[in-house]
Image (cartoon, rainbow, N blue to C red):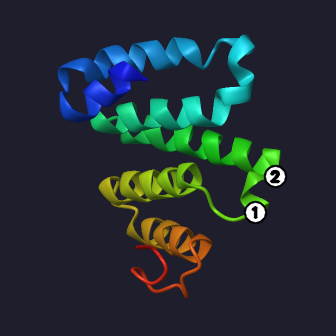
Amino acid sequence: ISITKKANSNPIFAEEACSLWSEAIQDETLTEFAETMHALYASVLARVGRDRQALKEFETSLRLLEKSGATSKAATKVEIDIRLGMGKCLQRLLRYGEARNTFLDASNRCGGDGVIGNGWE
């Protein structure tokens, strides 16, 4: 996690963080943290411009959250970060309609009325 934080402010660490997270998500002893690990891996992939891969990891992370039942409760910061990360990747991939819908989903999960900015402060 430390190297991921460094990767967010210093791109030199981002490739190393990608490599470390790629290995970590394969470790079957860490499955209880899988959704967070996939989300962190996705964030460093996005940092180095690998948005297609990042989107797949964000989607995996969100699926794991849904499978655990976490998305049937109030939204957590992790869930919102995943949804916003997905939206940003989609936007950079020029998939604007999907990005818009993903951002609206995040807003709605925060109690908003579907208008970006309402309920997410």
Label 2 to label 1: alpha-carbon separation: 7 Å
Foreground of the two, 55 or 77: 77
Task: Kindly indicate whether the residue at mark 1 contacts the one at mark 2 (C-beta within 8 angstroms).
Answer: yes
Q: Residue at 38%, 68% (x, y): give it.
A: 96
Coordinates of residue 13 in the picture (x, y in percent)? 25, 19
- Can you say which quadrant of the picture contains the N terminus? top left
Q: Residue at 40%, 62% (x, y): give it.
A: 95
Badge 1 crowding class, 10 Å Cα cut-off, few under 14, some 14 to 19, many 20 or more, is few
Label disc, if present, on residue 73 of the rendered structure: 1
Foreground of the two, 7 or 76: 76
Label disc, if present, on residue 9 of the rendered structure: none
Q: Secondary structure at mark 1?
A: loop
Badge 2 crowding class, 10 Å Cα cut-off, few under 14, some 14 to 19, many 20 or more, is few
Label disc, if present, on residue 69 of the rendered structure: 2
Coordinates of residue 85 in the picture (x, y in percent)? 43, 51
Residue 92 visible somewhere in the drawing: yes
**At label 2, which amino acid type do we have?**
Gly
Left-right relation of 11 to 31 = left
Foreground of the two, 50 or 11: 11
Left-right relation of 118 to 6 = right
Q: Residue at 29%, 24% (x, y): give it.
A: 14
Foreground of the two, 104 or 68: 68
- Count of number-bearing discs: 2
Coordinates of residue 46 in the picture (x, y in percent)? 35, 39
Residue 48 visible somewhere in the drawing: no
Using the image, determine if residue 103 lies above or below residue 87: below
Using the image, determine if residue 57 lies above or below residue 107: above
Q: Residue at 59%, 79% (x, y): give it.
A: 111
- Can you say which quadrant of the picture contains the C terminus? bottom left
Q: Secondary structure at mark 2?
A: loop
**At label 1, which amino acid type do we have?**
Lys
Q: In which quadrant of the rendered view does residue 16 lie? A: top left
